[in-house]
């Protein structure tokens, strides 16, 4: 029987990105070799802040067309101390997400076996969320400008954009995600009391699309109240949809409440599947620990599992997460989770677990 080969483009980027992506590739390659049910072909792209400093561009001419030749993109992080954040973000991450129409940013959060939440009385199972972030417009649409630069009367505008088209497609995706989960509940986060145009359209479209999903419970929450609910009643939340800015903030809080930013994954999906989707750990470049070999690779492993799910390799994704959680449960944890293990020790241990699964243990 011929097995499917998935072509994966890797962009390790900056900071700890190369360390965790290399760990991710090791684990994915081992999984593919051990299970033998699929193959992976990796193509490496050295697009980073170093490239930008040398060439003036993060993505070379024709680079996006090359990316489109792949089935998925595995991304590390972007951001360097000597490049302004808005240059690096717009130069690489957003320069991929926006033209490739990866309009749904999906961030699952749960407490893995062997890890713990900083919340008292919150055990694995009490916190199991998927946050869906609108990834194409909203507050990060890039609309606005600056006049009278450097003058005392300088003005800057940052205009949030909410189009019926984009709100409708993200709501439909969010309701579908909520429907696929056991609790069938979607919390629509808003700020329509203060933002009376875009966010009111957001709420109205949510209610309209909700009519097509009678089996999904629609729950509404203002973003400020949502932060308190996440900390105080984590068990009352399941699937969440929020604007680009709101979900960006809420999902960092979610990652911290689940134990560490070092375990959280995110997927930038083009649900139409016309373009490859991009998968990345939620964390940034983490320059404070770069090059020390102590970055937690779990976020990248979970990211890799999300990628496999999207590619249809659901059994392999499950095996990968099982292996990761067994390692965490065994107490082999990096510093961010209170342990002393290195990136390599965790990676090697996950590979050993994968090999045990493959051998039918
Ligand atoms: P960015 O602006 O690129 O998001 P940042 O420095 O604001 O970067 P992170 O890079 O995510 O945010 O780092 C925040 C903190 O979390 C840092 O102290 C970092 O060391 C820690 N951290 C992030 N990722 C990991 C990881 N994989 N393993 C261990 N610690 C991590």
Image (tube, grey):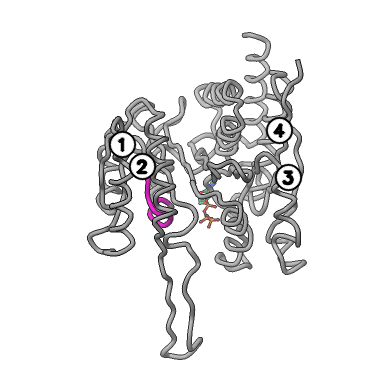
| Foreground tag (1 vs 4) | 4
Mark 1 highlights which residue?
237
Q: Tell whether position 351 is magenta.
A: no
Determine whether label 2 and label 3 are within 8 Å by CB.
Answer: no
Determine whether label 4 and label 3 are within 8 Å by CB.
Answer: no
Crowding at mark 4 (Cα within 10 Å: few <14, some 14-19, many 20+): some
Determine whether label 2 and label 4 are within 8 Å by CB.
Answer: no
The correct choice, above or below, for 333 with respect to 136 in the image is above
Of 215 and 267, which appears nearest the observer? Answer: 215
What percent of the width, then of the height, locates residue 143? 48, 70
Residue 240: numbered disc = 2
At horizontal 30% and vertical 48% (from top left) the residue drawn is 227
Task: Estimate the spatial distance between the alpha carbons at disc 1 and disc 4, rounded to whole Å.
Answer: 34 Å
Of 241 and 75, which appears nearest the observer? Answer: 241
Of 320 and 113, which appears nearest the observer? Answer: 320
Residue 69: numbered disc = 3
Q: Secondary structure at mark 2?
A: strand
Residue 6: numbered disc = 4
Crowding at mark 3 (Cα within 10 Å: few <14, some 14-19, many 20+): few
How many numbered discs sit on the rendered protein? 4
Task: Estimate the spatial distance between the alpha carbons at disc 1 and disc 2, rounded to whole Å.
Answer: 8 Å
What percent of the width, then of the height, locates residue 48? 69, 57
Crowding at mark 2 (Cα within 10 Å: few <14, some 14-19, many 20+): many
At horizontal 49% and vertical 37% (from top left) the residue drawn is 337
Determine whether label 1 and label 2 are within 8 Å by CB.
Answer: yes
Task: Estimate the spatial distance between the alpha carbons at disc 2 and disc 3, rounded to whole Å.
Answer: 32 Å
The quadrant in which residue 327 appears is: top right
Q: Which residues are magenta?
A: 241-247
The quadrant in which residue 99 appears is: bottom right
């Amino acid at each position: 029987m011929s097995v499917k080969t998935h072509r994966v483009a890797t962009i390790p980027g900056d900071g700890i990105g190369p360390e965790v992506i290399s760990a991710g590739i090791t684990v994915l390659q081992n999984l593919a070799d051990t299970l033998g049910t699929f193959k992976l072909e990796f193509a490496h792209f050295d697009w980073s802040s170093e490239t930008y400093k040398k060439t003036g561009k993060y993505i070379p001419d024709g680079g996006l067309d090359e990316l489109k030749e792949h089935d998925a993109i595995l991304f590390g992080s972007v951001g360097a101390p000597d490049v302004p954040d808005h240059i690096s973000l717009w130069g690489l991450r957003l320069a991929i997400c926006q033209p490739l129409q990866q309009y749904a940013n999906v961030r699952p959060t749960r407490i893995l076996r062997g890890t713990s939440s900083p919340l008292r009385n919150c055990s694995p199972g009490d916190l199991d969320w998927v946050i869906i972030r609108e990834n194409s417009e909203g507050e990060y649409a890039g609309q606005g400008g600056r006049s009278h630069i450097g003058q005392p009367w300088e003005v800057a505008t940052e205009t949030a954009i909410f189009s019926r088209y984009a709100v409708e497609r993200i709501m439909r995706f969010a309701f579908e995600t909520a429907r696929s989960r056991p609790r069938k509940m979607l919390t629509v986060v808003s700020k329509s009391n203060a933002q009376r145009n875009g966010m009111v359209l957001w709420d109205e479209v949510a209610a309209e699309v909700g009519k097509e999903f009678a089996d999904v419970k629609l729950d509404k929450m203002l973003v400020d109240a949502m932060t308190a609910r996440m900390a105080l009643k984590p068990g009352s939340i399941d699937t969440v949809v929020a604007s680009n800015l709101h979900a960006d903030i809420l999902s960092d809080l979610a990652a911290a409440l689940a134990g560490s930013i070092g375990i959280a994954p995110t997927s930038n999906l083009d649900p139409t599947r016309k373009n490859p989707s991009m998968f990345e750990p939620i964390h940034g470049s983490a320059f404070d620990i770069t090059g020390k070999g102590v970055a937690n690779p779990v976020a990248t492993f979970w990211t890799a599992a999300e990628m496999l799910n999207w590619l249809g390799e659901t059994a392999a994704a499950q095996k990968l997460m099982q292996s990761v959680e067994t390692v965490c449960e065994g107490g082999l944890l990096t510093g961010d989770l209170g342990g002393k293990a290195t990136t390599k020790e965790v990676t090697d241990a996950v590979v050993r677990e994968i090999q045990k699964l493959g051998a039918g243990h």
